[in-house]
Image (spheres, rainbow, N blue to C red):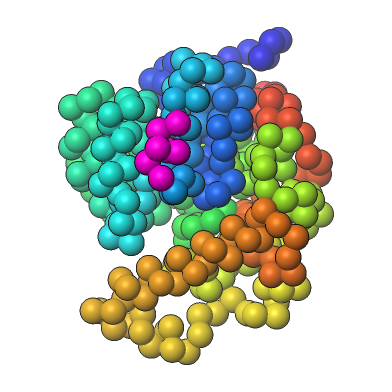
Amino acid sequence: MQNISKIETPFTKMMGIDYPIIMAPMFLVSNTKMIIEALKSGITAAFPALNYRTDEDFRNAITKIKTATDKPFGVNLIVNKSNVKYKSQLDTCIDMKVDFIITSLGSPEETINRCKKRGIKVFCDVVDLKYAKKVEALGADALIAVTSEAGGHSGKLSSKELIPMLRKACKIPVIGAGGVARSADLKKMLDLGADAVSAGTVFIASDECEVSEGYKQAIVDYGGKDVVLTENLSGTPLTVINTPYVQKVGTKAGGLTKILLKNKKLKKWVKMFVAVKGMKSIEKAAFSATYKTFWVAGPGIEYIHSIRPVKEIIRSLVLVKK
């Protein structure tokens, strides 16, 4: 990207990139075209391993990115028991020498221990100080502060609460996640003490994104107040656009599901069942015309007004006014 000054932070130095931004891994949404454009535009990016059904497809995606650019990128791993592919996905990440792994929804201990030996960095999703201190002690390389403004699985604390708290108590880089759609949002996060940001929703409304035009247009047409939490898709509250279909089916888990989730022995399996069913609903809504519209997004849609190329979105984010 030309004519824009680099923004230097401990995170950009660690990663060797121009701007302190991660294109966030988005389930079903992230693709190699988006990742490659992000890397060529001076930021880094990650995609969920679960976006690929087979190990061959997963490896091919990593190879395609590595062939297009030598810039650093990562993979997001769900590290709890609900992800039955976790072990094989971690093996592949290590074998293919990805630059970093983002861990979500579980203990990162095994991931950190195995990656440290191979020079692969591990960034951990955290929602509070207690867990942040825990993963820092395990050897995490950075903390991704998942705030209440985040899309998908959001946190409970606002960026104003969580980021300064982590900055004060922890020594490793802090990456703010949630509500980043404009240069003003990047500046706010950096001013709060973040070393970088993780931005996802803003990139759904991009030319390179392969979701349906209806999904992209919804990102443009709806506002921040239209984003709600639903318990119907993953076993864990997830942010979606409050479409007429979401209003019709409601956002609370059914009575039987609620009862089963309270059973310690059954909880894991119920979450897995809900997640698998939810993934299918999200996939159908994301890529085809259907009235059953479960469109995952964060409240940052308030400031997304058009569908643009990835490089243009990045340019608008890094033109930070001082």
Percent position of residue 290, x then y: 73, 65
Picture quadrant of residue 98: top left
Is 75 one of the magenta-colored residues? no
Q: Is residue 237 above or below residue 161?
A: below
Left or right of 77 on screen, residue 67: right
Percent position of residue 162, x then y: 44, 49
Tell me which segment is drawn in magenta: 54-60
Percent position of residue 312, x then y: 73, 27
Q: Is residue 157 above or below residue 9?
A: below
Query: Which one is in front, 75 or 65?
Result: 65
Q: Residue at x 36, y 80 (%)?
A: 261
Q: Residue at x 67, y 73 (%)?
A: 246
Q: Residue at x 74, y 69 (%)?
A: 291
Does any portion of residue 246 appear in the rendered image?
yes
Left or right of 132 on screen, residue 50: right
Please state, as top left, top right, bottom left or bottom right, where the C terminus lies in the image.
Answer: top right
Q: Is residue 99 above or below residue 248?
A: above
Query: Which one is in front, 146 or 25?
Result: 25
Percent position of residue 148, x then y: 53, 57
Left or right of 202 on screen, residue 99: left
Please state, as top left, top right, bottom left or bottom right, where the N terminus lies in the image.
Answer: top right
**Numbered marks: total:** 0
Is 57 one of the magenta-colored residues? yes
Overall secondary structure of the magenta section: helix
Q: Residue at x 78, y 39 (%)?
A: 307
Does any portion of residue 135 appear in the rendered image?
no
Q: Is residue 241 above or below residue 10?
A: below
